[in-house]
Every structure is written in structure tokens, then in C-alpha cells.
Image (cartoon, coloured by chain):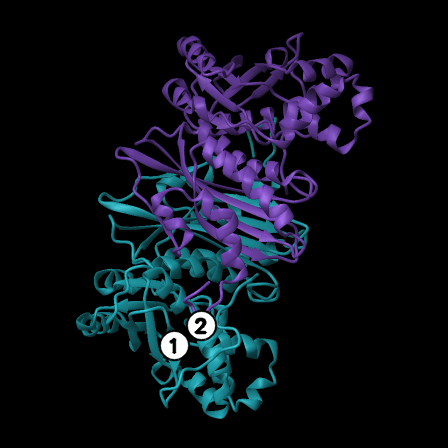
Chain colours: A purple, B cyan
Amino acid sequence: MSGEPHVAQSGEDRLIARYFRPLARHAGAFALMDDAAVIAPPAGCDVVLKADGIIAGVHFFPDDPPDLVGKKALRVNLSDLAAKAARPLGFLLTLALPDEIGDAWLAPFARGLGEDAELFDCPLFGGDTDRTPGPVTISVAMFGAVPHGRMLRRAGAQAGDRVVVTGTIGDASLGLALRRNASLAGKWGLEAEQGNTLQARYLVPQPRTNVAEIFGHYASAGMDISDGLTGDLAKLCRASGVGAEVHATRVPLSQAAGSVLARDPTLIEAVLTGGDDYEILATVPAGKVEPLRTEAAGNGVAVTEIGTVRAGHSVRVLDQHGNALAFARPSFSHF
Amino acid sequence: MSGEPHVAQSGEDRLIARYFRPLARHAGAFALMDDAAVIAPPAGCDVVLKADGIIAGVHFFPDDPPDLVGKKALRVNLSDLAAKAARPLGFLLTLALPDEIGDAWLAPFARGLGEDAELFDCPLFGGDTDRTPGPVTISVAMFGAVPHGRMLRRAGAQAGDRVVVTGTIGDASLGLALRRNASLAGKWGLEAEQGNTLQARYLVPQPRTNVAEIFGHYASAGMDISDGLTGDLAKLCRASGVGAEVHATRVPLSQAAGSVLARDPTLIEAVLTGGDDYEILATVPAGKVEPLRTEAAGNGVAVTEIGTVRAGHSVRVLDQHGNALAFARPSFSHF
């Protein structure tokens, strides 16, 4: 750059200018030309805080399309915010990149990230980019706004409340299995289109941002499903000091997942415990399920009642005969 | 845990409960038992946002004491906040840990992190812990508070303002060189104590949190020095649309660094461009330098005037004869 005799523009500056400045549209991000950003939270609102990272070879495949990796990094956090009834305000990004990552990966990564920053009205506020001897590591810290005191908590479910979920469950888990072993498509009798649908659900979660406010209005407790429906329901119940009974047959399935389960009913465990659903799991007072469902449907999001909150501590998934299912591994954990 | 027949406590839950819950003292962190945290920013304040990561083998040595690694991860962000005139509110932590990292590392890491969270009144609000095939990667997103519209920016320096720095410059750079090559201690004629002082400055930065408000009151622009004094001054000047002249002989040195430079004057380049200082660099209207210096001294922080902001774009470091020094690598960049 001209006029700066003592400091040439560094590689890091170039990278920020080319790929990340266009995502920093909020005035408080100072076009990423300062060391920190500033935001005045909306009046009457609390700031909701969430951080989640994704790592190549752990949360995504190193050869996943970079634009979709960018979307995923943002969406796993957007999903949390939605389930907390918060709307996104923006995010910070810390990137650790191995030497072999250059423009060919960064350009589509930033493009995907930028498309979603725009789509979800969630601009970039700053961050940090470093080289690493390890895999691509993407950490997003996201902040959102919720009316004061109204963040939807895990705690809050009451005996008698109904258990509901958005969308369909298990697609991502089956999609991941397909991604790891393409021959399963034949075994499961899937059309190419069905297999693609399942894999897309693993690749790119669909955060339920557009119904966050509706859940904030009607739900008594909520969280997003990232580690599997049964395990996450148990976490919500533990925090609320209640139990629950859900019916496996009521759990909403996509056409593709339904067809897989018809072929191999034992895969119900993968569906209910596999994780990466990024749907909202919530409890709702019985009388509020209908208005919640109607308003969510008006925003294009299906809400399905799958069970009931019970007094006690037992969280049970019942089969079509009313018998409790037992799972080897009820929830995903990295440790 | 008792009363939870379907979900055993996962390894991740255990890790959070044992090491990180004690750091989450703010009510809005919900003792890390929810998916997100919530904070009501202080009335009349903006929220300042900053994220910075450190990686084993890049920003610290894999065999650095884990408690000091924890402190460093927090302090590099605290330093930014201080230079922006903001006081810390809290932080989010995303950890990526290789398989070999267990309690022996995590216990002291969390202890160091917790000591500083307490010392700087900066509680943990949440985060994420994953396994990685790569090195230990620690990403901190920090948020602070500053009176509305008063974040100290890089932009704002005016011709005639004085350039000031806190503390001493160059210790960390020399400390890192010593850490890499212990034989330099002999070459530089350092006592063991002096060598330890320099290395400690690299290991554990000293964020200037306790003078942040004073700089907010008096300074026209500010940033912390992380990539080297000359490069960071050039960044500040570029953002402000000004130039500057600083005098190498006025740059404050520790007794140890002064003794090294007396032995090998060419090391002035390492001192002025080496980075990791984590001191505040600011510009201050001429008439305000004295009150700033006095108030900062009252908080135990030395402030030294090292030069003057000039019209134009030229940023020059002058030697004792008034000649401009030229450096091969004026600033640190990862790319």
C-alpha cells in the first residue's frame, strides 16, 4: 500500500481485507480495522453468549466443500441461539489454518460464511487468524439478543408440559453413516436423491432462527439437539428436575429416514441418539402446543409433539408397545 | 450420578464440572448447566468484543507450565480490552485438546485460568471442549464494558499528540529468544535472575487493566502492543491518518533489556519489532500527558512519552543521532 514506508501490508492483513472485511457490515466492527469491536445491545434486552468450535476430521470432513464448512461453523451456533429464543446480533471468528490452506479454500469458505451472515442477519465483528500445525480449527463466539430475563433455559419444564421438536430427527446421523460408508445406500434401498438429502442434513444444519421468538413466547424450556434427542432430552430434564416419556413412533422422520427405518428398524437408535440434528427440543404447557404449532407452521417450521414431561427423574423412550427402549450409547460425548 | 437411569455423566460433563464450573461465578453463566449464557450489560455502556486464540507450538511451548498457558490465553485478550479503555465482563472458552491431554495438564491449566478470572474479575460464561488430532488450541472470546461511545480506537490520533507506552518494551521478545537458545544468556552477560525476568515476560503478559479507565479519559487513540512497537504504531497511525516520530532512546527498557542492549546494540530491532509486549500504546494530547502519567503511576503503571504524532503518513523511529532506523521485518505476521 502506498504512503506507508515502514510497514508493508502483511499476509494476515491481506487475508482479512480480501475475505473477512466484506462480512463485517456492522458499524461497530470498524471494518475489522481496529483491535476490538463494539456493540450497544438493544434496549431492554439481555445479551446471550455462546461459543462452539468445529475441527476438520472431528466435526467435518477435510474434503467437505469449504463454503458448507463456513455455513456449518455459523449454523451450529445459530441453532443454539434459536433454541434459547434469542436473535443473532453477530459473531467473532478465530481460525487456525494449516499451511496448505490458501485462497482455494479460503475464498469459498468466506463466501459460504458471508452468505449465512447475510441470511441470518449475523455480521462478523472480529476475530483472529493463525497458522497451526494441526487441522483446520474454526471457533465461533456468537452473541444474540433476548428480551430481559426471557432467555429460554434448560430449566423450566413442568410435569404435564408436552415435549416437542422442530423439523425431523435422525437425518444427519444417517447422513453421516452414509458419508462414511456409501454402500449403505444400497443396503438401505435409498434413491440417490434420498441419500443426498440425508447427507445434506449432516453437512449443513438448518438453524430455526425464524421461530426463536415464537418458542420464547410459548415454551417452558428449550435447547437445540446436537448430541442426540434422547441424551439432550435427559439433559433438559435433569436441569428442570423432572422426567419425561416420549414415544419413538411420534418422533418426526423425513421421508428418507422413514424409508431407512422401514428397512432396518434397529436404526431407531441411530436416529434417536446420533446427534447433529440442530432442531429445537422444547417443553410447552399443554394448552400452548396448538398456538405454537400454528405460528411455527406459519413460518414454515413443523413442530411435533412427541411426549410428556413427568414428575420424577426417569427419561424414557417408549416403543409402539409402550415398552421402554434401552440404548447402548444414549448421547454423544467427545470424552 | 444418581437418579438418571438413562444418561450417565459423560466425560465432557465431568471435565466441565471438575475444572470449569468453579470459574463460572456469574449468575448468567448458569453454572455452565445450560447451552448459553446471558448478561445484562451495565446501563449506559457499550459491549466491547474481542477474540484471540493461542496454539501450542505457535504461541506457547507445549511444555510451558499449564497454569501459565491458562493465564496467557486470558491475558492476551485482557490486554486488548485494557487498551480499548474497557473493563472485562467475562469470557467464553473453546478448547481443542489432543488425546494425551488429561487431568495432569487440565488441572493446573484451569487453576491458572481461574486465578486470573478472579484477579481480573472476568468470569467464565461458557464454551466448548473437543478432542483434536492437532495441538492444544485455546480460543478465548472476551467481552467488556465501556461507557457508550467511549471505546478507545486506533483512529483518533491528531498531529501534535504525544506517543506514550506503558511499562517496558522488548522484554518478551528477548525472553523468547532466550527460551529458544539458552546460551544467549551467557553471550548477553545476563544473571540468572535477569534471564528469568525476560522469559517470564514472554510467558505471562501483564495486561494493563487497572489503567484502562485512565487511558479512556486522556488518550486520543490506543491499542495494545502484540506484534511489535513499530508495526503496531504504524497500524495506529494508518487508522488515524497521521504519521509519527518516536525516539528509540526514549523507549522504556527493563534493567535486564537495557543490559542486553548495552552488550549488543543491534538487538534494538528485536526490542522494537519483536512483539508480545502486551503494553498499551496510545496517543495523548500534549497537555494531558502529565495527568495521565501521574494517575497511572498512582496505579503502579509507568507511562513513558516516546515521541510525537505528525501530519502525513511517515512513521519513523529515530536513533540517538536523529537518523531513521530501518528494520528488516517491522512487524510480526502469521502469514
Of A108 and A250, nearer the camera is: A108
* Number of marks in picture: 2
**Looking at the rendered structure, which numbered label has been put on residue A249?**
none
Image location (x, y in percent) of residue A269: 69, 22
Report whether A232 appears left or right of B315: right
Residue type at numbered disc 1: Arg
Image location (x, y in percent) of residue B16: 52, 44
In this view, B64 is above or below B325: above
Name which residue lies at 43% across and 16% down: A284
Asked whether the beta carbons under mark 1 and mark 2 sit within 8 Å of each other, the answer is: yes
- Mark 2 Cα within 10 Å, few/some/many (few <14, many 20+)? many
Of B276 and B327, nearer the camera is: B327
**Looking at the rendered structure, which numbered label has been put on residue A6?**
2
- Mark 1 Cα within 10 Å, few/some/many (few <14, many 20+)? many
Quadrant of the frame with the C terminus of chain A: top right
Image location (x, y in percent) of residue A170: 64, 22
Q: Which element is circle 2 on?
A: loop
Q: Quadrant of residue A159?
A: top left
Marked residue chain, label 2: A
Q: Quadrant of residue B182?
A: bottom right
Name which residue lies at 59% across and 27% down: A277
Residue to which mark 1 is pinned: B316
Q: Which element is circle 1 on?
A: strand
Distance, label 1 to label 2, CA atoms, is 7 Å
In this view, B168 is above or below A190: below
Residue type at numbered disc 2: His
Residue B78 visible, this angle: yes
Residue B302 visible, this angle: no
Marked residue chain, label 1: B
Image location (x, y in percent) of residue B15: 56, 46
Report whether A181 appears left or right of A73: right
